[in-house]
Image (cartoon, rainbow, N blue to C red):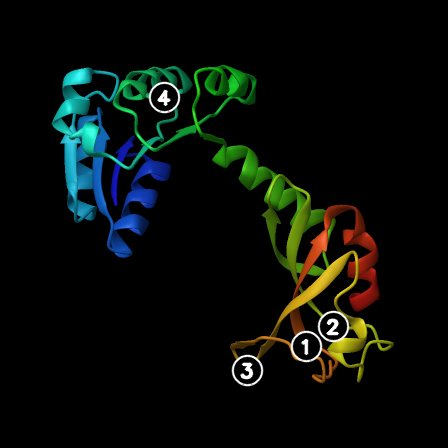
Amino acid sequence: MYIVIMGGGRVGLRLAISLVKVGLDVTLIENDSDLCSNAASELDAMVICGNGTDIKTLLEANIADADVFVAATGNDEANLLSCILVNDYKIPKVIARVSNPDHDEAFRKVGIDIVVSPELTAAGYLEKLITRPKIADLIVIGKGNAELLELSVNNSKIFGKKIGDLSPTNDYIIAAVHKNGEIKIPKDGMMLKKGNRISILVKTPAIKAVTKKFTQ
């Protein structure tokens, strides 16, 4: 798989490094000379010092061969323009970073597959961790209809109960039990003990009740 990323700042560079680590072919485009030099020193991939809103630069990156294009700069206007330009090359997947949520609709109107806002995602993640102190970690699933929560079992009413007697229900399923640094796929006969860390897939409206059930 070949991925072209425009933007060698914090988001773009980290994404490029992660993709290279899993063996994917990556080209990074960055306009700023300092960021370009930094990316070239940290990234084991092609780095092009140029403007991703310039068709010549995109052609230099072999944009027609890309399976994925990611516009990851902090400039919404530049991201939008680059995505419009690459639309002519029928790239299977186009992803754009959006800093201002008011611009979200403009990106979708031009047919961009996925629009993401790392800033809003990070803020939402922190807000949930602050307002739900009994949850150790979480992942939002789909369009926010469910969350994968990690928490410790501290409700004495749960101690000694079999997972099969607790899960699944219409609102949640116990997806994993963490023991001695390993993740165990839960079996019906496995018993929960005080302090067990578990991962639960929960429908969003039931999060408060399910958290209380296991941590009260």
Badge 1 amino acid: Asn
Is 34 in front, or is 53?
53
Q: Which residue is mark 4?
A: 79
The answer for how far apart the CA atoms under marks 1 and 2 are is 5 Å
Query: In terms of secondary structure, where does tag 4 sit?
Result: helix
Residue found 22% across the figure and 35% down from its top:
28
Q: Which residue is mark 1?
A: 196
Mark 1 touches mark 2? (CB < 8 Å): yes
The answer for how far apart the CA atoms under marks 4 and 2 are is 45 Å
Badge 3 amino acid: Asn
Query: In terms of secondary structure, where does tag 2 sit?
Result: loop
Is 149 in front, or is 128?
149
Q: Which residue is mark 3?
A: 180
Mark 4 touches mark 2? (CB < 8 Å): no
Task: Specify whether 165 is left or right of 10.
Answer: right
Quadrant of residue 41 in the image?
top left
Q: Position of residue 114 (x, y in %)?
A: 46, 31
Sequence order check: which comes first, mark 1 or mark 4? Answer: 4
Marking on residue 153:
2
Mark 4 nearby-residue class (10 Å; few <14, some 14–19, many ≥20):
many
The answer for how far apart the CA atoms under marks 1 and 4 are is 45 Å
Residue found 73% across the figure and 80% down from its top:
192
Residue 198 vertical placement versus 124 (above, below): below
Q: Looking at the figure, which quarter contains the N terminus?
A: top left
Q: Position of residue 154 (x, y in %)?
A: 78, 73
Mark 2 nearby-residue class (10 Å; few <14, some 14–19, many ≥20):
many
Q: Position of residue 13 (x, y in %)?
A: 29, 41
Residue 170 vertical placement versus 58 (above, below): below
Q: Residue furthest right?
A: 157
Badge 4 amino acid: Asn
Sequence order check: which comes first, mark 2 or mark 3? Answer: 2
**Tally of numbered tags:** 4
